[in-house]
Amino acid sequence: KGGHKSFVLLVIILGFVISTHIFFTIGLRILLNTNEPIVVVTSGSMEPSIKVGDILVLRGATPDEIHIGDVILYSGSVHGPDTLIVHRVVKKYSVGDEIFFITKGDANPAVDPVPVPYSKVFGKVVLRIPVLGFILLWLKAGGIIIYAIIVLLIIVALWGIYSSETDDISNIHVPSPNTELFSDNFSFNPVIP
């Protein structure tokens, strides 16, 4: 019976881990209409309003929904085409059918040197969760191995708790008055200073 409880608990934990992963990798993308619904800030370019270690939640936005003063996430910069940047929109203009944004980090002295085409925008920031991103940065630094070790440690700990509750208590030895603990051979000699 105890083994059955442990197996059920293991299935529940694994189901929770898998469903959480699916929610964060697929569900939020659909709900928030962006391929990058959650990012962790790794640069101080937006301080003091957005700090390193903050988690940002983004929502996909059309060009008409992005205004001067909004903070957007976009890809591509002088650091490389795959670099993700979170900066504030300071100007918006169009060339032909394409909309462009001039952006600037709040802590930076000048605007970004390259205009951002709307096609590179993932969305705009709708929520900031301070500091908690450090946990995600730590997990990311160690990769999936650290995440797997933590999950396994939780499973082993819960397994131990539940299996110890189901142990047969009939094997526990309780001394009776006729045992050596209470025998006549027992002597107690207190030391009195």
Image (cartoon, helix red, strand yellow):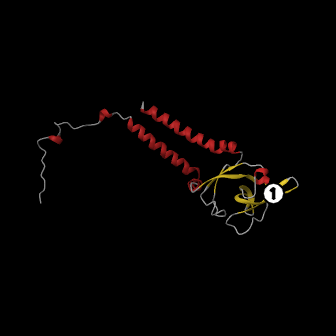
User: Looking at the rendering, in which quadrant would you find the C terminus?
Assistant: bottom left
Horizontal relation, residue 62 to residue 192: left or right: right
Does 143 sit above or below residue 156?
A: below
Image coords of residue 191 (percent x, y): 13, 56
- Label 1, residues with CA under 10 Å away: few <14, some 14-19, many ≥20: many
Q: Which residue is at 68% across, 50% downward?
A: 58
The total number of labels drawn is 1
Give the camera-side residue of 97 and 193: 97
Horizontal relation, residue 97 to residue 143: left or right: right
Give the camera-side residue of 126 and 1: 126
Residue closest to the far right:
96
Q: Which residue is at 48% across, 34% downward?
A: 7
Give, as a three-letter code, the residue at label 1.
Answer: Phe
Residue closest to the far bottom:
109
Q: Which residue is mark 1?
A: 100
Give the camera-side residue of 89 and 98: 89
Q: For numbered disc 1, what is the local secondary structure?
A: strand
User: Looking at the rendering, in which quadrant would you find the N terminus?
Assistant: top left
Q: Which residue is at 19% across, 36% downward?
A: 176
Does 109 sit above or below residue 136?
A: below
Residue closest to the far top:
1
**Residue 104 sits in which quadrant?**
bottom right
Image coords of residue 149 (percent x, y): 52, 48
Image coords of residue 16 (percent x, y): 55, 39
**Residue 89 sits in which quadrant?**
bottom right
